[in-house]
Image (cartoon, grey):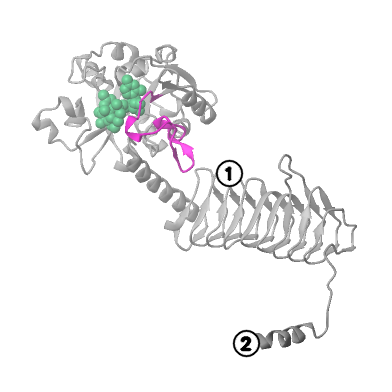
Amino acid sequence: MSRPDASARTCLTIALAAGEGTRMKSALPKVLHPVAGRPMVAHVLAACATAGADALAVVVGPGRDDVARAATVAAPDASIFVQTERLGTAHATLAARDAIARGWDDLLIVFGDTPLLRSETLAALRAALASGAAVAAMGFEPADPTGYGRLLIEGGALLAIREHKDATAAERAVRTCNAGIMAIDGRRALELLDAISNTNAQREFYLTDVVEVARARGLRCVAVMAPEEEAMGVNDRVQLAAAEAVMQRRLRESAMRMGATMIAPETVFMCWDTRIGRDVLIEPNVVFGPGVVVEDGAVIHAFSHLEGAYVRGGASAGPFARLRPGADLGRNAKVGNFVEVKAAQVGEGAKISHLSYIGDASVGADANIGAGTITCNYDGFSKFRTTIGAGAFIGSNSSLVAPVTIGHGAYVGSGSVVTEDVEADALAIARGRQAQKPGWAAAFRARQKPRGKT
Ligand code: UD1
Ligand code: MG
């Protein structure tokens, strides 16, 4: 007996990722191509986990340790199964036979190349099982149905799924297509899957045939409709870009709904894990790589690139700022134009306003780093740290040769090359002394006059 309460039901999800993806023309397996900075298969597994899967199985091709690794990064408890020969989607599903045999209320089968699948749709498929269906297939109505399996529906019941290659002209006229994602009564799944044969145009074991197999046993099958974009399978780079565009739109909309302002959202590019607080202003043409957090009230000015960076409340970056991994801007800190920050803590209220490189450093609260300051952190072999105390003032165009410490409240004269620690509240000047030769320029010009220049 199936339990009616969907949330109380146990669920195994199998993600099929043994596809070759030859149309990607890539050394990288298809399902590892990133969308919003994360492999497609990881998006799919995340949606499955959110939909309440108790266990995840991933079916990979032989020797595809890279796919297995990416899957276990996204879902550490996922078990990996290898499909040794590529004999069709039902055959791929049965590669996870041992997992299915453990016994589940719901079996969800998803494809590793549909990164836009949302957990709500998976939950709807599970709900169909909870209300008594033995098979629920995700359907959609694409603008162009060519190539997709067609859902043959009559009076609300799903009668069969016909692959495009096997369909009659009348069946090809059906516009409701199979997304490929399917939910099967977990208690009957092995029996149904084992009954599928490969007598079709492609001589493959089609998962889609589970519908006719189930109906032959008097079981009910249904279709659950979803928006076309969710069913979008990525087979080539053009479709990859299309999936990216949809994902970016979702991420921007979600950030704006959470209280961020984007002046030109279509020019802002985010990662799957970008976290943007309330009342954050993001100006046009900003790129967020992985691992960025921007807290409430911060401003990211135009043309900035952030990656692995933490921007605390009220801080600002850019225009044209580059925040690399480990950049941590304190509250109300300011990083201005053409400034690069890497592995550096910038204290509350500190300012690095123009044209600087601050790497492997810590900058104390309210310190002021003048234009063109460079932390010289690398000798070609090792990296060294620069520590700048609270309230210190670094004059423009200074080079701080690490390892070096500038005490709190200290001043560094402009143009200094600082190689030794500077005491708190001291002034360090490390540059050539200025010489002055009165009248020299006028005398020089006078000497040049006979040569015809004025
Ligand atoms: C499948 C569906 C079709 C649906 C379409 C939606 C079947 C038989 N057909 O067709 O009804 O309209 O998706 O995009 O299911 N895979 C394996 N091992 C295999 C075969 C496939 O792991 O032996 C994996 C692929 O990596 C892929 C997924 O299963 O992730 C679907 O396989 P694919 O060959 O793309 O099926 P389609 O012909 O697109
Ligand atoms: Mg496909």
Q: Is residue 133 visible?
A: no
Quadrant holding ligand 1? top left
Q: Name which residue type carries label 2.
A: Gly
Residue lying at 29% horizontally and 14% vertically, measured from the top left: 192
Secondary element at tag 2: loop
Residue at numbered disc 1: 291
Residue numbers of the magenta segment: 15-44
Q: Quadrant of the C terminus?
A: bottom right
Q: Residue 118: where, in percent of width, then height?
A: 40, 38
Q: Is residue 185 visible?
A: yes
Residue lying at 73% horizontally and 88% vertically, measured from the top left: 446
Where is 48 relative to 286, above or below?
above
Which quadrant would residue 22 be assigned to in this image? top left
Q: Name which residue type carries label 1.
A: Gly
Residue 452's label in the rendered image is: 2
Q: Quadrant of the N terminus?
A: top left
Which quadrant would residue 18 be assigned to in this image? top left
Q: Residue 69: where, in percent of width, then height?
A: 52, 25
Q: Residue 438: where, in percent of width, then height?
A: 83, 84
Left or right: 178 in relation to 412: left
Secondary element at tag 1: loop
Give the mark nearer the N terminus: 2 vs 1: 1
Residue lying at 65% horizontally and 57% vertically, measured from the top left: 313
